[in-house]
Amino acid sequence: MLTALSIKNYALIEDINISLQEGFTIITGETGAGKSIMLGALGLLLGNRADYGSIRDSQKKCVIEGSFNISNYKLKEFFETEDLDYEANTIIRREILASGKSRAFVNDTPVNLSSLNALGEYLIDIHSQHETLSLGNNDYQFQVIDTIAGNEAAILEYRQNLKELKKLQKRASNLLEEQAQATKEYDYNLFLLNELDEAKLQPGMLEELEERYEELNNVEELTERLGEAFNFASQEEIGSLSTLKEMRASLAKITSFSSNYEKLHERVQSVIIELDDITEEVASAMDRVEANPEELEATNEKLQLIYNLQKKHNAGTIEELLEITEELREKVSVSENAETALSEINEAIGNKKTDLDKIADRLHQNRKKIIAPFIKETEKILAELGMPNARLRIDLDSQEEFFVNGKDQLSWYLSANKGGDFKEMKKAASGGELSRIMLAVKSILAAQSNLPTIIFDEIDTGVSGDIAQKMGEILQKMGNSMQVIAITHLPQIAGKGSSHFKIFKEDSADATVTRIRTLESEDRVEELAMMLGGNNISESARAHAKALLN
């Protein structure tokens, strides 16, 4: 529960500090005094986004701090999951600067707004004035029924499976599109693939073919030039080998005279060995060179085939042609294997739908089980609130389609008067009736949940007199099991509170500020009397106020 609230430098609030108690707390004040401002500040504490224009003095930071006693609400696991220090008396602080920066802390540990928002859902339910209209909203109707039915975990499981189903369906749709496109191009792609496969391309083969073509196309010149080279090296009279051998013999006769001559002799010997080896290779090359018109024609045809493939596929190398071959092979494979892949995905979709059907049926059964008791309890509370003839009908119809909350369609109908027709909730109820229905729903939800605190912002809109008295009794009863805070303009409700705060505006020399103070005994009598009769308080109004408090 909320035990203390501090607000500094926010809108009309300069500095407010209040301590709150268990049970039913009342907040009153004239219209425009700042009640909604206080709720806005509390919303920031629970993770709402900041409006930097709400900072009162731009030279100072806005600080909102709340203390919460959470010892009885089993939140240790949440704190561990969020990596926060757990304290039985947890302090949440929000700091907002005019520069646009905002910081949030839980027990002095910095947190992001999503974590703060998640924690806030365990701590406080703020019922704003416009929320009453949400009774006619289908999402809210589902939320109420599922909360009472205990469907929260099943809803999360269902939505995760629904998300996975949609992914599978998208994959199947994409595969169908790919299959249709691949089918259109299949014959042409297969032709191109076969053409490339028949070429039997290998890395480096183009260079080898070009070299072989040059050899075969220049046989005569190769024979002539190799022969000349062989003769220059090996002729007995003028050949280089003969000359080198004579040179070697001359140097051999003087090697004993100096190491220099010995080295020269060795170098000539090395040259003779190398030249002799070269001469043998030239002779071998001469033996291999021969005219082969058939091979020349085949090599030329192979080269022209590769050149044509390169031009057709805009490829500069054999390697690029090989990459294109694999791409075509993949495209052809998609078309040939699409049926198998599609069959596998469709099987997965079928399995996922089966899982969803099971969860949706569980959700349906849980909802169906609690609807009748919920209607009975709601009608009982409405009778206490001056609607004895009100009848609530909730239709729950299972459909074939998977919706975000299961396969059910849920509709709430109301017959407010005896013998009246059932109409949709948003069309059947007036503002005052909606307020009473919302209070009935909230009281039932409060009994089901372990929520520490609920705040009602003028839940009494459109009611007065005895109905307001009954509303106060219900709020007071709710305060026996949780902390209830109600902002009200009705003295019948204000008189039921176990503690009472008044919000008011005060003018100083240079500014108007919002302040809040605790009302005790005579102050409460005066406040209720003023609510009953205006600023000119009569003794009868005071007597009535005392009666309400007693």
Image (cartoon, helix red, strand yellow):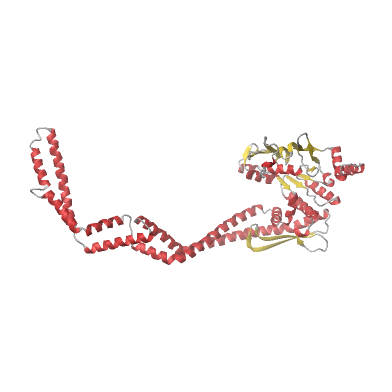
Q: Residue drawn 15% across and 47% down? A: 276
Q: Nearer the viewer, residue 252 or 109?
A: 252
| Occupied quadrant, residue 286 | bottom left
> Residue pushed farthest front?
510
Which quadrant is the C terminus positioned in? Answer: top right
Residue 453 percent coordinates (x, y): 73, 44
| Occupied quadrant, residue 268 | top left
Residue 324 percent coordinates (x, y): 39, 58
> Residue pushed farthest top?
258
Q: Is residue 204 left or right of residue 540?
A: left
Q: Is residue 397 left or right of residue 312?
A: right
Q: Is residue 392 visible?
A: no
Q: Residue drawn 33% across and 55% down? A: 203
Residue 417 percent coordinates (x, y): 82, 60
Q: Nearer the viewer, residue 371 or 495?
A: 495
Q: Is residue 147 left or right of residue 80?
A: right
Which quadrant is the N terminus positioned in? Answer: top right
Q: Nearer the viewer, residue 425 or 129?
A: 129
Q: Is residue 10 visible?
A: yes
Query: How many labels, in total?
Result: 0
Residue 442's place in the image compared with 306, above or below, is above
| Occupied quadrant, residue 390 | bottom right
Residue 124 percent coordinates (x, y): 71, 45
Residue 451's place in the image compared with 155, above or below, is above
Q: Is residue 432 left or right of residue 115?
A: right
Residue 54's place in the image compared with 204, above or below, is above
